Image (spheres, coloured by chain):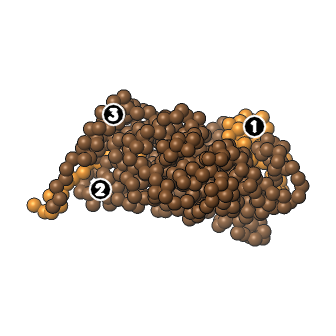
Chain colours: A brown, B orange
Amino acid sequence: MLRASAVAEQIGVPTVSIIGSAFMKQAALVSRGLGVPLAIAEYPGAPMVDSDEELRAKVERNLLPAIIKGLTSVERPEPDKAPVEPEPGAVVFKGTLDEVEEYFHQQLWSDGLPVIPPTRERVDAFLNFTDRDPHEVIGTLPQEGREADILSIAVNGVMAGCRPEYMPLLVAIVEAISDPNFRIETAGSTPAWEALVIVSGPVIKDLDLNYGQGVMKVGRQANSSIGRFVRLFFRNLCGYRIPPGTGDKGSIGYTFNVALAEDEEWTRKIGWPTFAMDVGFKAGENVVTVQSVTTISPPTYSAGDTAVAHVQQFADVFGRVFSYLAHSGVKRGYWYPLIVIGPAIATVIAQQWSKDEVRRFLWEKMTMPASLMRHFCAQTAGQELDFSKLVKEGTLPDYYAASSDPDRPIPIIVKPEHIGLVVAGDPGRNQSRGYMSNNVQGTRTSRHVELPRDWERLLERERQKQSAPRAPI
Amino acid sequence: MTLKNLENQFEVLWPLGRKAVRARTAAARLPDLAGKTVGELWDYIFRGEIVYPMIREHLRARFPGIKFVDYSVFGNFHGAKSKEISSGLADQIRSHGCDAIISGIGA
């Protein structure tokens, strides 16, 4: 919304933006990131819980005077004086480990956990694992308008506890989240989505990523630290910080996701294409995919020796879990469910069904009453969900308006091809899990992982360093 | 020598990136809204269907000749067509002759 105001200001049209009081600090941050000082009319409190009388009173008492002043004031809003900042690569502090930790906490540069001090030597070790120039800018990221360069990736990678050899993966992740299609400008929204990185290709084994039992638990260095890197990058390059920071308005939220690696060997063995192939890459190509996750299903057990027994269970459980927030994606025309299928279950399904058949079945079976989706939508932001209008404007396929029955079943997932299927987890247990994106925010985006020219040699040297004997005390 | 002096000292690098945004001054404000055209941009959430008509009513009563370009003309820049609408917004604002914009609602 503030971006729309900035567009108008840039063509010489004065604006005033209506903002709820709880969002004033974020508005100031976004305004600075856009480079345009914006006039604000503050709505006190939350409009969704005010009575009609309170709403009207606040419009008259608070909004109208601020709107008139914002558009007609003799003094136009002036830009804040930006503080002088260090140059990328500058040493900003010297101290003991404790002092460094304290300094980073004070500056809001950590995620609340201790960080590995990003010394020049450690950062250089990361830069050795890319052929790219440290000052190459991948993109300018909202909401602070900062340049995401190769150097900033290395610094935050060190801080997150990554190993230097993860650098090619980290670069690919930042390329993915910098793609306008990903919509990183939405990452501070109230549902509090977290990015999920899906890793495919030989690099999974090269970097010792867990794709088996406990795949989504904190505990394996590569999965955990790569997941943490993404969260730190969102904080430090984009400015998404919860209080005492200002940019992240996630209302409740949850912790960051560890990186998910797919069990490619198992997937090939059962005759299915890998997830990377599903999103358009060649077999054996190193790929990262990033998407938002706002909702995670319970661990879902399914039994039987037929495909339908398992996939029906997915539909029953994930359909219920996804039904609450589905309106948010449906009204925008798409969202991305991701199902992590336990290897043993995938084996049974693959004997009878292709991945496309699984997707088709889930899309057909995962439905909910149109009236309930409309209700959930109205509760969220007071928005009317008009299926006929969305079909007419081409946002939704015509089956959403095929009947005027308010309780008709409608698909929770807009199209079967939006469903992602990844085989991973414990091969010795019959468990799967569903993940839901936050509508089009954090849209599923993939990138090829570019390895340095002498990858094998660098990797071997790093492995030797890591396996050097350490004498116990 | 104190214990602190025996500990390792770390020189650490700045973890942020250079700000690439050039600060600009806002557009000149209007001396008066009388006779002006005000465009409404709405993200179709947070009860704007009540808020915007109220704003219209009060401003019409106070500023003679004020005109409004209704939010429905611009469409929902927070919805399915947000990218298309945002990319064409400057042209839309110009083509409707807007002198000022009221944008909402962030809450």
* Amino acid identity at mark 3: Glu
Q: Point out the frontmost of discs 1 and 2.
A: 2
Q: Position of residue A407 (x, y in %)?
A: 84, 61
Q: Is residue B82 above or below residue A58?
A: above
- Residue at which label 3 appears: A456
Do the CB atoms of the residues marked 1 and 2 lie less than 8 Å apart? no
Q: Point out the frontmost of discs 3 and 1.
A: 3
What chain does mark 2 sit on? A
Please tell me how crowded label 1 is: few (under 14), some (14-19), or many (20+) other residues with Cα within 10 Å.
some
Q: Is residue A347 visible?
A: yes
Provide the secondary structure element on which disc 3 rests.
Answer: helix
* Amino acid identity at mark 2: Val
What chain does mark 3 sit on? A
Closer to us: A434 or A122: A434
Q: CA distance from mark 3 to mark 2?
A: 34 Å
Q: CA distance from mark 3 to mark 1?
A: 54 Å
Quarter of the rendering containing residue A96: bottom left
Label whose residue precedes the other's in the sequence (3 or 2): 2
Q: Who's the residue at 40% across and 43% down the image? A: A205
Q: Position of residue A209 (x, y in %)?
A: 41, 48
- Residue at which label 1 appears: B92
Please tell me how crowded label 2 is: few (under 14), some (14-19), or many (20+) other residues with Cα within 10 Å.
many
Q: Quadrant of the C terminus of chain A?
A: bottom left
Residue farthest along the right direction in this orientation: A404
Residue farthest along the front direction in this orientation: A305
Mark identifier at residue A100:
2
